[in-house]
Image (cartoon, rainbow, N blue to C red):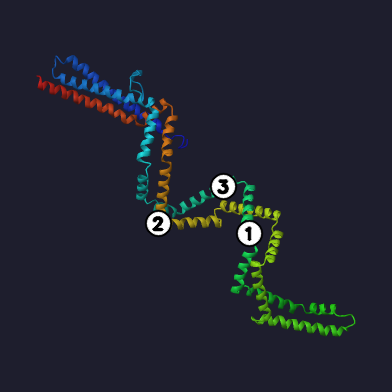
Amino acid sequence: MTAAQISVDPDAAKLTALKRMKRIALALLIVMAIIFVFSFALQRQYPWLEYLRSAAEGGMVGALADWFAVTALFRYPLGLKIPHTAIIPNRKNEIGASLGEFVEANFLSEEVVTAKLASVGIAAKIGAWLTKPESAQRVATEGSAAIRGVVAVLNDDDVRDVIESMVRKHLLDPPWGPPVGRMAAQIFADGHHTQLVDLLVDRAEGWVAANRDVIAGLVSDRSPHWVPNFVDGLVGDRVYLELANFVRAVQLDPHHQVRQQIDHYLLSLAQDLQSDPLMIAKAESIKEQLLDDPRVRELAGRTWDTVKTALMTAVDDPNSQLRMKFTTAVQELGARLVADAELSGKVNAWIGDAAAYLVRTYRHQIASVITETVERWDAEETSAKIELQVGKDLQFIRINGTVVGSLAGLAIFTVANLIFP
């Protein structure tokens, strides 16, 4: 048998304790009644028993009065529908409403909530908890579960529509020419394009050096048929040498005229993209050709599928970079909340403001949960539940009433005998 199977029902334990206290209170009443009967019967023979009789009489009166008072809270005493009895079943809704108003007025106030949060130092406590590896792992696990839930709920077509609309709004609808021109002008002005020019010139020089026969063949193919072959060879070699020298000169001289012309052309192109209507129209035409409707839809679909697959793979793998970095970030945040008093103070202020706003805005709705819950309860069941929770302590009223009544009866009888012997 497992521990869960042999666990004790707390309500059963409370019911047992309640019945035991009721038996004790009843036993005291019976004892007082027995003492009263014997002392009343023998008091003429033994006058001192008058004192014992008075004590027992007062004890019975106190016990019965307090039994009536306690019983009247939960049910009709002896089934008699006496006014102002069975208070809890008959006034359940009013009690629930009063309890809700009491909680709203005394607990759900901005001053109480903010003062309590300020005294707790909740940011530092949260930080200390987050610095623990097991706590950070738990936060990462719960975050992964939340991400999986969100992804599962999202409709793929809806997400693709959102991505497509964002692409159109922020990428396709604005003209490309002016922003591309401004960016290119800044790049060219800062000289960042020179590395690209160097790369192109280096590749050109390498190609020329490796394709001498190709260049010579091009010259031969384009010469008249009546030119002798040896002349074609001489001309081809000469053209190759001149071309190789030219490319090498451009490669070695950073201020070569060709480089300057390239810079001038690029700067002019950047300016035209910003101000020339014809160039701007050409850029828009290129954009429309590259990103027509089918391509945009396909791009949105591939983007979401890639993000979704990568995200789900990362959150499902405890050793993924995403999970590990998130866990580390959680621990670092916790350490900062503990060590950085300024950050901790800001977080405490944010939490206090948020709690104050919630209390200020929704205090009545929060308190109404108590009222509405009590209203839904069955009257008899409510009475039984409350008696089960507090009835044991209320039985002490009956016990105390018996004792106090006995002492009061004895004291009254003694004082009366002293005054009127």
Left-right relation of 322 to 67 = right
In the rendered image, residue 415, in percent from the top left (x then y), is placed at 13, 23
In the rendered image, residue 342, in percent from the top left (x then y), is placed at 39, 58
In the rendered image, residue 389, in percent from the top left (x then y), is placed at 37, 32
Real-space Cα distance between discs 2 and 3? 32 Å
Kind of residue sitting beneath label 3: Val
Callout in the foreground (2, 3): 3
Quadrant of residue 184 within the rendered picture: bottom right
Outermost residue toward the right in this view? 226
Kind of residue sitting beneath label 2: Val
Is 47 situated above or below 19? above
- Residue displayed at 40% across by 49% down: 352
- Residue displayed at 59% across by 53% down: 311
Real-space Cα distance between discs 1 and 2? 47 Å
Q: What element does badge 2 sit on?
A: helix
Q: State the residue position of label 1.
A: 174
Q: State the residue position of label 3.
A: 150
Mark 1 or 2, nearer chain start: 1
Callout in the foreground (1, 2): 1
Instruction: Evaluate if marks 3 and 1 touch, with contact meaning CB atoms under 8 Å apart.
Output: no
Real-space Cα distance between discs 3 and 1? 32 Å
**Residue in the foreground of this view, choosing between 160 and 128:** 160
Q: State the residue position of label 2.
A: 338
Kind of residue sitting beneath label 1: Pro
**Residue in the foreground of this view, choosing between 13 and 342:** 342
Mark 2 or 3, nearer chain start: 3
In the rendered image, residue 398, in percent from the top left (x then y), is placed at 28, 26
